[in-house]
Image: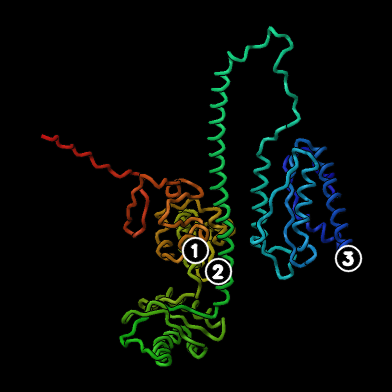
Amino acid sequence: MKMDSLEEEEKEVIVSVIENFFCDAVGETKDGKVIDETIEEVTQEFLKVIKIAAERLVNSKFALSLPIRRPRDKWYTTRLQAITKRFCDGIGELGLSNVSWIEAPREVEQIFDDFGVHLTKESGIFFVESLMSRATEFFNAEVVDLAMEIEDVVDESADDVIPLEKTTKTTKKKKEDGRIDSIEKDLGEFRADVLKRRHFDSMVTMRLAENQDVEQNKAREDRIVINGLTNSIPCPTGQEEKEKWLRDMVVPLIDSIVPESSKDIAFVNLAGNKERDIPLCEVKFNSRETAIKIRREFAAKKKGGKDFGRVAVFNSVTLGTRVRIEVLWAIAKKRGNENEIATVQSYLSKPTLILKDKDGKRRPLKLGYADAITRFGKTLREGDLASAYRKAGTSFQNVMQQNFVVLHDLNKARAGPWGGKGGASFPQSGLKRTREPNGIAKPSLTKPKSKPNKAVPKKK
């Protein structure tokens, strides 16, 4: 590794993927002793190069990322903890104020491809964003020079020495004031760090939850969900009778959309019914292509003017995905204007927000849920998310913010990640909970009126 090409104008330097140096140097070696010696040699050489560069560019700051996992190499996995400790100790031994290590994303956030060498695309993007965020904190921190000289505070001449008793009270008062200011500052910084870390953790969990749901949705692409069916005949109790009862409703509808496609039905599930209304019916086909064709044809025929009544056909996705679709539509409504068209591709396994100019001069911008929230989440207000709250119901109790970031548990005072209306931090005391027309509980900053004290009658 060479850093001779760095110029003085480059004030902020991030160095990562040191694990590549270890794995390349070790290669196919199986001897444990040789592996340990190679790791030490690479560490020393790496730190030597960093030291030379940091001493040459004293006005630049170097942020060194801690090593991350490498699932393919078992010898590396078993030594990762020791490698990380040696790496941190070596940086400390350099004794340079412009060099520091920064934490890499946690192991649960490191998602690798099938080869166990490279991060997946989504995990790689998050890896870079995480390093940039943590490195920025180091770059913006003030460098303290511990070697600065201490000025003489007492002169050798006794005439210049102020008696201690005359300054005791003043000194104590200054110390107390300074101590209080310091405590208040530390508490403020601690609270800010906690809120920032909580938001950061929610952003991580949000991406992981979205990726997990995408994988589940892909496995269900051979299914469709039908909503709005009705039947005057009550649902039978027997399994065979129930399936025939369902097929008698589903088959005519399916064949009206794509003729002869009902022959590819594998099974039909009933999610529940109430008298004549059937809220949800899931149909699985023997092929993924048939399900996709039916969804597309239904959308095309409905757009062409064919009346299906209350019946709607959707792709089969997780509840979390349906909530994300509602949030993406809320963003689309905010973004759409006379110059920009905003829409949501909700029929995909990974719903996507589409932004494009009406004049077509720029290429359309396509964003998944996590990227859309990162860019536009701060524009949303509580009133924009009513449909998303209704869709989520109570299924995500206590993990609402971790899964969706912009949604919060309604039974708790909320501290939004971006602040603003609907995102401010509300104290528990002195709050009334008002109920909006949509049924969502909303905190109010007006304090409850206190009852006047009744006069106590005097005894006769």
Q: Where's the C terminus, which quadrant?
A: top left
From the image, state whether disc 2 or disc 3 is nearer to you.
3
Out of 237 and 429, give the one closest to the viewer: 429
Check disc 3: other Cα within 10 Å, few if <14, some if 14-19, many if 20+. few
Query: Disc 1 designates what residue?
Result: 324
Identified by mark 1, the residue type is Arg
Question: Percent position (x, y) of residue 459?
Answer: 13, 35
Q: Are marks 2 and 3 in contact (CB under 8 Å)?
A: no
Q: Which residue is found at the position 40% from the left and 47% from the top?
A: 428
6 w.r.t. 345: above or below: above
Above or below: residue 43 compared with residue 263: above
For disc 3, the marked residue is: 31
Gap between marks 1 and 2, in whole Å?
11 Å
The residue under the point 49% across, 53% down is 339
Residue 115 to residue 180: above or below? below
Determine if residue 360 is in view.
Answer: yes
Position of residue 222 in the picture relative to residue 236 (left or right):
right
- Position of residue 149 measured from the top left corner of the image (x, y, whole percent): 75, 24
Residue under pointer 2: 213
Going from N to C along the chain, the mark reached first, 2 or 3, is 3
Q: Amino acid at mark 3?
A: Asp
Q: Amino acid at mark 2?
A: Asp
Quadrant assignment, res 4: top right
Q: Residue furthest top?
A: 159
- Nearest to the eye among marks 3 and 1: give it: 3
* Left or right side of 44 for 132: left
| 155 relative to 212, above or below | above
Nearest the eye: 33 or 425 = 33
